[in-house]
Image (cartoon, helix red, strand yellow):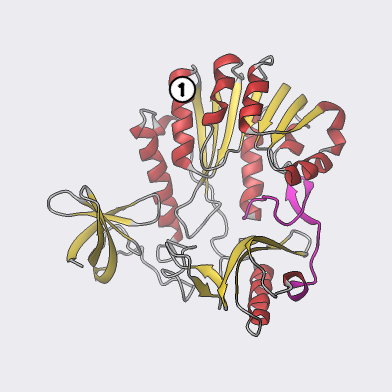
Amino acid sequence: MRTIDVAIHALAFGGDGVGRTPGGKAIFVPGTVPGERVRARIVRDKGSHAFALLDEILERAPERIEPRCSVAGICGGCTWQHIEIAAQRAWKRRLLAGELARLGLDPDAVLEPIRGGESYGFRIRARLHRRGVAFGTLERRSIRAVPLRECPILEPDLERFALDLSKRLESLPPCDADVELYADAEGRRGFFQASGEGGLIDWENIAGPLAKELVERSGDRRILFEPGVFVQTNRGMNALLVEEVLRAAGSGDRFAEVYAGAGNLTLNLVDRFARGTAAEADPAAVRWLWTNTAHARDRLDIRCETDDSTARSLAAAKPVDLLVADPPRAGMRALYPIFEKAPPARVVMASCHPMAAVRDIAQLVRAHRYRLISIVPIDVFPQTDHLEIVARLDR
């Protein structure tokens, strides 16, 4: 493997630092900070760019700090613990601005300051992995488990829960399984086996006592859900996310929401609109959506259906005043027929994948005569390159 010295000038979505050879080839090096000069080993050369591993820091950036976690840089969960939090947030906003500009949108006109909160002790759910007898997170770009010794991004009760479970597993038979752990807003713990074979392990017995019904907050309301149903990982930033979505949504006669989940946004939207439709593909989430919006059952149509079915039904109906979408990482391509045949007056998008979101925004602006009003970046995922955004577009 060839070793080179390279100056790091940027960060990239994905978490790596970026440098260039004298010939202009981009070199992606994890664990680095813009402003540093490093020695790195090329491990994969793709012609136009290459991937390398950090060998030595030759010149250190002032934004570099010591990670709190002993496995930072090994674990794949936190890619930026070595970067001071203000610098993390500045780079997230800068990367988003660059993506907007690349697609011909003006970031200076629409991009608001990044919103952030606690940078440690914020995570209320975590997916952990048992590989053989090892239990913990996964190595960066690997399926091997990093044994759990600490995890400072977890909410303290969730970290205690995870460490206690890790201890109990030490004497039990090996297996391969992925599990999700929860610490809810009212002090209860939840457990869900997401995949894999449990082997001879009675997970729920060794993880208990556990709650089958968990509670989080959405605005001023309680939202009920069961382990395995999606909820935001960051309680404080979810409160801000709901606030920003509602600020962008306004009020009116009819709204539609897609990817509604258990009702995190829905149960607030029904207070602002006379009637609405909420669609979600996960049957378990739909059951809780029904429960969480019981106060507005006569004004809300709840549908358990796929993206394609939702697109067909909304495209065939009268245009709504507002469409709210909280899409998966793939984005909203399946919903484009709605904008062609029954364009909503306003679209509010909450997305955890800025690149997919900006592609969707550019499509709405160019092809469907929408005007981008604002984008609010929210740092739901400190210590990583991930970012949530709330975007408002008006027809």
- Secondary structure state at the residue bearing disc 1: helix
Asked if residue 161 lies left or right of residue 87, the reply is right
Name the amino acid type tagged 1: Val
Residue lying farthest to the bottom in this orientation = 171
Above or below, comparing residue 159 to residue 342 in the picture: below
Above or below, comparing residue 244 to residue 161 in the picture: above
- Between 42 and 172, the residue placed more toward the observer is 172
Asked if residue 208 lies left or right of residue 18, the reply is right
**Magenta stretch, residue numbers:** 205-233
The image quadrant where one finds the N terminus is bottom left
Question: Residue 153 at what x, y percent from top left?
Answer: 56, 65
Give the residue drawn at x 67%, y 27%.
Answer: 250
Examine the rendering and report whether any part of residue 347 can be seen: yes
Above or below, comparing residue 64 to residue 282 in the picture: below
Above or below, comparing residue 339 to residue 181 in the picture: above
Which quadrant of the figure has residue 340? top right
- Between 176 and 141, the residue placed more toward the observer is 176
The image quadrant where one finds the C terminus is top right
Give the residue drawn at x 81%, y 59%.
Answer: 212
Question: Residue 348 at what x, y percent from top left?
Answer: 59, 31
Q: Residues within 10 Å of mark 1 (few under 14, many from 20)?
A: some
Question: Residue 225 at what x, y percent from top left?
Answer: 76, 51
Question: Residue 268 at what x, y percent from top left?
Answer: 74, 37
Determine which residue is flagged by label 1. Answer: 365
- Between 182 and 145, the residue placed more toward the observer is 145
